[in-house]
Image (cartoon, grey):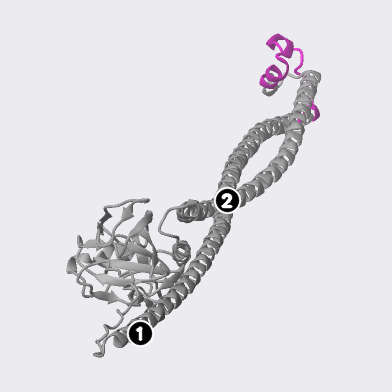
Amino acid sequence: MNRDLPYVACDVPSNSEHVQQFANIRRISKKVVTSIAGAFLAFAVVAPMAYADPLDDQRNRVNEQIEQNEEHLHEHNAELEHATQVLDSSRQELAAAQEKLAQTRAELAAAEEADRQAAADLQAAEIELRRAIWVVNVNQVKVETQRRIVGENVRASYQQNSELVGMALWVDNLKTSDLAKRNQWTNQALRVTDAEFERLERLQAELDQARAARATAEREEAAKRAEAAKVLTDKQQLAEQAAAEETALSQAVAANEQAEANARAEVEKEQARREELLREQAEVEKQIQERIERERAEAARKAEEERLARERAAQERAEREAADRRAAEDRAAADRRASAKPKEQPSAPRQSNAAAPSSSIVNPVSNVRITSKFGYRVHPILKTRRMHDGTDFGASCGTPLIAIADGVVTSKVWNNAYGNRMIVDFGRIDGKNVTAAYNHATRYTVGKGDRVRKGQTIGYVGTTGWSTGCHLHFTTWVNGNLTDPMTIL
C-alpha cells in the first residue's frame, strides 16, 4: 500500500508557502522518495501499552536506525554515482591517450623506417663519397703521370723553340740555360707535346670536378645524417611523452576504479544493514503483536471473569430481593393477622444496573478545522494517487497541541517528511490500544518517556518537514492498525 505524505488545503495562511522547498522536493528522485516512504512505514506498527518497556525502546531504536540507514544509503548512492561518472571520464581520457599513443608509435615507426631509409641513403652517399675520393685520387695520379710525360717530351724535343720555354718551366722547373741545348726539336715532337699538354689540362679539369663532387657528397652525407638523427630523436621524445601520459591515466583509472569499488561496497554495506534492521524490526513487531494478543486474551479473560462475577452478583442480588420480598410478605401477613386494618407495605428499593461511563478523549487542537481527510487522494506534490495516513487539521502556527488522553511519549524525532514528529502511547481507551503521532510541530514541550495528561499542552502547531502550511497532521493506530483518526475523536 502506498503511503502518502501530509499536506493541507489551499486555504491555509498565505505565509505558509515554501516555494523554494517545493522546488527542491520535486527534484528528489523516485528512488529516494520510495526509500523515505519505506522508512515511514516503520511507524505504522502495533501500539504499545501506556508504559515504556524493552520492546518499545527496541522498536524506537530500530526505527531511528532505519531512518539513519536510509540517509546514509542515499549519501553513498550519490557518492557511487559521482565515482562512476569520474571513472567513465577517466576511461575516456585514457582511451584518447591510448589512441594518441598508438598514433605516436605509428609516427615513430615511420620515423624509424625513414631513419633506416636515411641510413641506406647515407650508406649510398658514403659509397658515392668513397667513389669520389677514389676518382680524385685516380685523377691525381693521372695528372701527375701526364705532367711527367709532358716534361719528358719537352726535354726530349730539346729545341730552341721559345714557345716551349714557358711550358718547360711550368712542367719541370727547367733552367733557361738548359733550354739552350734543346733548340733542335722537330715539328712532330711539337705536335705530340701539344696533345699531351691538352690531355694534361683535361685531366686537371676532371680532378677539379672530382674534388667538387667529393665536397658535395660530404655535405649531403652530413645533412642527411643530421636530419635522420633529429627526426628519430623527436619521435622518440613524443613516444616517451605519450607513454608517460598513458601510464598516468592508467594509474588514475585504477584509482577511480578503486574509489568506485569503495563507494559500491559502502552502498552494499548499508543495504545489508538495512535488511538486517528490517528483519530486526519485523521480529520486534512480531513480539509486540504477540504481547498485544496476550494482553487482549488476558483482558478477555478478565472481562469474562467480571461478567461471570456480575452475573453471580446479579443472581445473588435477585435471590436476596426475592428473600426480602418473601420476608416482607410474611411480615405483611402477620400484620394483617394482627390488625384488622391492613397497612400499606413500602416497596423494595430498586437496584441500579447502569454501567460506568466510558473513557472520553479530547481533540488534539481546539476549533477543529479539517483540511485533508484520511484515505486515498492525489498527492499535491508528487501528483500521484496515494494513501494519506492521517487527518490534517488547519490551524495557525503556534496553536497549542493537546494530549487527547493520558499517555506516555514513546518517540520524539525529526523526520524529513513529517518534520518535528512525536508519538504518544495512550494505552487502552474503551478497551482498545490507541497510539497517535503529532507531526509538523514548531516544537514540543515534552520529551521521550514523559507522561502526559488529557488536555495538557504538549507542543505547538508548525509547518516543518514536507508541509504546505501551518497545520497538524494527526495519525492514529488502534490495536496496532492504521486507523482514521475521526473514528475515535
In-front residue for pair 48/185? 48
In-front residue for pair 462/83? 462
Mark nearest the camera among 1 and 2 is: 1
Side of 236 relative to 313 (left or right)? right
Kind of residue at disc 2: Lys
Side of 115 relative to 153 (left or right)? left
Residue 376 visible in the shown view: no
In-front residue for pair 158/405? 405
For marks 1 and 2 on the same chain, the one whose residue lies earlier in the sequence:
2
- Which residue is disc 1 drawn over? 329
Residue 269 image label: 2
Give percent across and percent down for residue 265.
59, 50
Kind of residue at disc 1: Glu
Magenta span dominant secondary structure:
helix
Q: Identify the magenta region.
A: 166-191
The image quarter in which residue 375 lies: bottom left
Badge 1: few (under 14), some or many (20 or more) residues near its Cα, within 10 Å? few
Give percent across and percent down for residue 49.
44, 60
Q: Is residue 215 above or below residue 478?
A: above
Mark 1: which secondary structure? Answer: helix
Q: Is residue 331 above or below residue 473?
A: below
